[in-house]
Image (tube, rainbow, N blue to C red):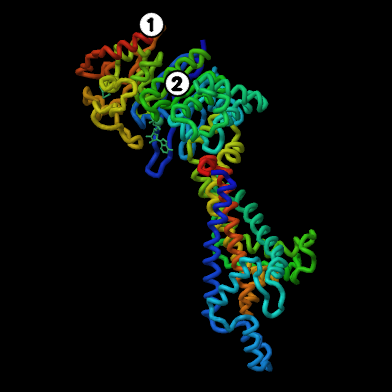
């Protein structure tokens, strides 16, 4: 069966004063109908650029250079502006990192939900209002009927994010893109919002692409994960495999620094160094300056994405490391020990 | 605080300002040498000096300055702004007679400014750093830099004298008749140009800034047409910054009316003020200045109300 969303060889560059930044480089992944797909990586890995590309919202000086984005087989990159507008907010909904900035301060929360409903579903204003109130209620806004006419500044941060979720779900999209939807929130609110996202996507059978820099969040919510580094996918795996049997040294590095959900400590301090400048990416493997297993070959040869294992439903795990083309002399020497708290969460997720 | 209370508070707050304006104007008129009687004597050298002294006594000009001021103030508090010395007409009557002309001119200037500035600013912001933006910047800079008397003379020379599209004589018809528009266009454009140029730049800057905000991406992500994104979401936020300078622009239009009315022979308060200054008609000068001050206070208030209508966050603070 055709995947719901299929991204093939997507490349996005920004033509800046300093040079060409290739923020997303030859990226491919698929999301199935109703699937919860996580995208993980440090800040600057290209996660948001990927998300905006799905809606063709990359603005100058950025440009989608090449690739395909197939939604039910139709290439979004081939569509006319009018056609892509029919997709935005209608078949693909977007949740932003900071609800406060994503809401227009001068229109009521209700109006901002209703306008998309009126536009896409051709409801009249009373019907749209009714549906918006229903949605506000569904995302857990108490007294939704009255809060409909509130302005964003009259909502708390958590409520604003709920409203943005209502907005994204308003036209019953096939896929929801959530770009770090809980980063701006406190711990308790974060947990509640994640629960809400899980419940709603289950209820409406909406696929979700959940972007985060927090593997803990992925463990809570996702079925499958893609780890991004410097604009590329470095590992793709079902969430269980990723935790119990990670294949890429970067994933391992991320893993050893997993905080509990909501822990705000500096998440990636255990991987020394910083992500490279995307104007002048390292030769060979992009991770080699920080990789504890880097060898001579890593500085010269760029690794391909290699399928490393078959999950229960076919070839599911892949990683971008020379180990899997047998180009490493010493191999990867990591052991994975799973801390109880995390395995508890991953298992809990699976048995539900 | 309710809106009514807010308005009342602002009007009361303007009282000390207007008081200050009257004191300063009064003082300035007395520091500069000469008075109305000197002017009358200069116009008619046969007036004997005892007649001049009699006139000064009659006008109260022989009193100490502070007595004159208190007399004047006492009148004002009972609604009497005094007489125009040379014609014995009531100052209020003169001001009221000239007021509609000035208001018509100012309003025309404002409407012209808004009609140019808002669409021009939107266009420049949407096409930021492209040819259209550069052209609009050039036009705006010219509009800001050109002195209004010069612009007025040029417009008159080209469109009224050379092309003969507009009348050159003083208005020959009543203010409310449609053909009055022909007399209004050139001075109206002249008086509105600087404000239009200023406002266009502010509009452009504030809209360009708003366009970078995430709610714009969010609105696009909802699938709204670009027209809706710009004219509904971005425009209203951009107008907030424009209203904060609107009162300042009103003041510049009011100030411009003095020059423009003189250049175009427009029978409004501005020209009346110039004549009054020449003749040292203190009562008339004071009344016009006070009235102008009050009008600017009102314009400020109006801008604040529009501001609150545009921005719900401000509304809550009232
Ligand atoms: N508007 C822009 N102009 C120039 N470069 C950009 C722009 N947006 C993103 N980039 C580049 O793309 C890279 C990836 O950004 P982003 O996708 O936002 O990362 P993240 O994974 O943190 O969401 C950044 O490091 C930055 O260099
Ligand atoms: S290719 Fe080399 S540098 Fe890159 S991840 Fe594998 S071992 Fe590390
Ligand atoms: Mg991001």
From what the image shows, is residue B36 above or below residue A93?
A: below
**Quadrant of the drawing holding the C terminus of chain A:** top left
> Which circle's residue, 1 or 2, is located before the other in the chain?
2
Disc 2 within 8 angstroms of ligand 1 (CB): no
Residue A29, picture quadrant: top left
Residue B253, picture quadrant: bottom right
Query: Mark 1 to mark 2: distance in Å?
Result: 22 Å
Q: Is residue A158 left or right of residue B302?
A: left
Label 2: chain letter: A
| Residue shown at the point (36%, 16%) measured from the top left | A219
Toward the viewer: B22 or B33? B22
Residue A327 in picture, x, y percent from top left: 26, 19
Toward the viewer: A160 or B317? B317
Mark 2 nearby-residue class (10 Å; few <14, some 14–19, many ≥20): many
Mark 1 nearby-residue class (10 Å; few <14, some 14–19, many ≥20): few
Residue A82 in picture, x, y percent from top left: 61, 30
Residue designated by label 2: A209
């Amino acid at each position: 069966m055709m995947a719901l969303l299929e991204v093939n060889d997507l490349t996005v560059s920004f033509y800046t004063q300093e040079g060409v930044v290739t923020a997303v480089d030859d990226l491919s992944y698929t999301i199935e109908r109703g699937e919860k797909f996580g995208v993980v990586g440090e800040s600057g890995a290209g996660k948001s650029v990927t998300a905006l590309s799905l809606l063709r919202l990359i603005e100058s000086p950025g440009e989608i250079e090449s690739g395909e984005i197939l939604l039910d087989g139709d290439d979004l990159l081939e569509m006319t502006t009018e056609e892509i507008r029919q997709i935005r907010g209608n078949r693909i909904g977007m949740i932003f990192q900071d609800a406060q900035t994503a809401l227009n301060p001068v229109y009521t929360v209700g109006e901002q939900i209703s306008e998309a409903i009126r536009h896409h579903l051709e409801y009249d204003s009373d019907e749209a209002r009714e549906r918006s109130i229903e949605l506000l209620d569904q995302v857990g806004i108490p007294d939704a009927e009255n809060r409909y006419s509130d302005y964003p500044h009259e909502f708390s941060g958590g409520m604003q994010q709920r409203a943005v979720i209502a907005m994204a779900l308003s036209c019953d999209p096939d896929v929801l893109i959530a770009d770090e939807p809980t980063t701006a929130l406190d711990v308790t609110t974060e947990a509640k919002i994640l629960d809400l996202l899980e419940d709603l996507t289950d209820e409406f059978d909406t696929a979700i692409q959940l972007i985060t820099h927090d593997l803990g969040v992925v463990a809570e919510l996702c079925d499958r994960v893609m780890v991004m580094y410097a604009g590329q996918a470095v590992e793709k795996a079902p969430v269980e495999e990723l935790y119990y049997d990670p294949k890429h040294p970067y994933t391992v590095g991320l893993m050893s620094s997993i905080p509990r959900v909501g822990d705000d400590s500096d998440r990636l301090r255990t991987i020394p160094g910083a992500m490279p400048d995307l104007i002048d990416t390292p030769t060979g493997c992009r991770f080699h300056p920080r990789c504890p297993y880097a060898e001579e070959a890593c500085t010269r040869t760029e690794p391909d994405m290699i399928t490393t294992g078959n999950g229960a439903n076919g070839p599911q795990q892949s990683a971008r490391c020379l180990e899997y083309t047998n180009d490493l002399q010493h191999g990867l020497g990591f052991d994975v020990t799973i801390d109880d708290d995390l395995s508890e969460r991953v298992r809990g997720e699976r048995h539900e | 605080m309710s809106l009514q209370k807010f308005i009342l508070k602002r009007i009361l707050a303007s009282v000390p300002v207007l008081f200050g304006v009257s004191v300063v104007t009064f003082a300035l008129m007395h520091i500069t040498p000469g008075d109305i009687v000197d002017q009358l004597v200069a116009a008619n050298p046969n007036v004997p000096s005892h007649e001049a002294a009699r006139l000064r006594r009659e006008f109260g000009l022989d009193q100490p300055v502070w007595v004159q001021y208190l007399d004047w103030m006492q009148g004002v508090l009972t609604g009497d702004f005094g007489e125009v010395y040379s014609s014995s007409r009531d100052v209020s009557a003169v001001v009221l007679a000239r007021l509609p002309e000035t208001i018509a001119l100012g309003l025309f200037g404002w409407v012209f400014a808004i009609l140019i500035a808002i669409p021009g600013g939107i266009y420049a912001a949407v096409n930021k750093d492209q040819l259209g933006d550069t052209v609009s910047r050039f036009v705006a800079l010219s509009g800001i830099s050109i002195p209004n008397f010069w612009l007025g003379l040029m417009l008159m020379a080209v469109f009224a004298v050379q092309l003969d599209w507009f009348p050159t004589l003083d208005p020959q018809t009543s203010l409310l008749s449609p053909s009055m528009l022909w007399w209004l266009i050139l001075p109206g454009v002249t008086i509105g140009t600087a404000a239009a140029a200023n406002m266009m730049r502010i509009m452009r800057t504030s809209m360009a800034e708003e366009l970078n905000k995430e709610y714009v991406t969010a609105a696009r992500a909802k699938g709204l047409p670009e027209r809706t994104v710009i004219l509904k979401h971005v425009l209203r936020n951009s107008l907030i910054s424009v209203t904060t300078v609107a009162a300042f622009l009103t003041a510049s239009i009011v100030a411009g009316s003095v020059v423009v009315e003189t250049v175009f022979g427009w029978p409004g308060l501005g020209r009346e003020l110039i004549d009054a200054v020449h003749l040292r008609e203190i009562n008339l000068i004071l009344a016009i200045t006070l009235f102008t001050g009050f009008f600017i206070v009102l314009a400020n208030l109006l801008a604040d109300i529009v501001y609150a209508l545009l921005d719900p966050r401000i509304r809550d603070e009232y």
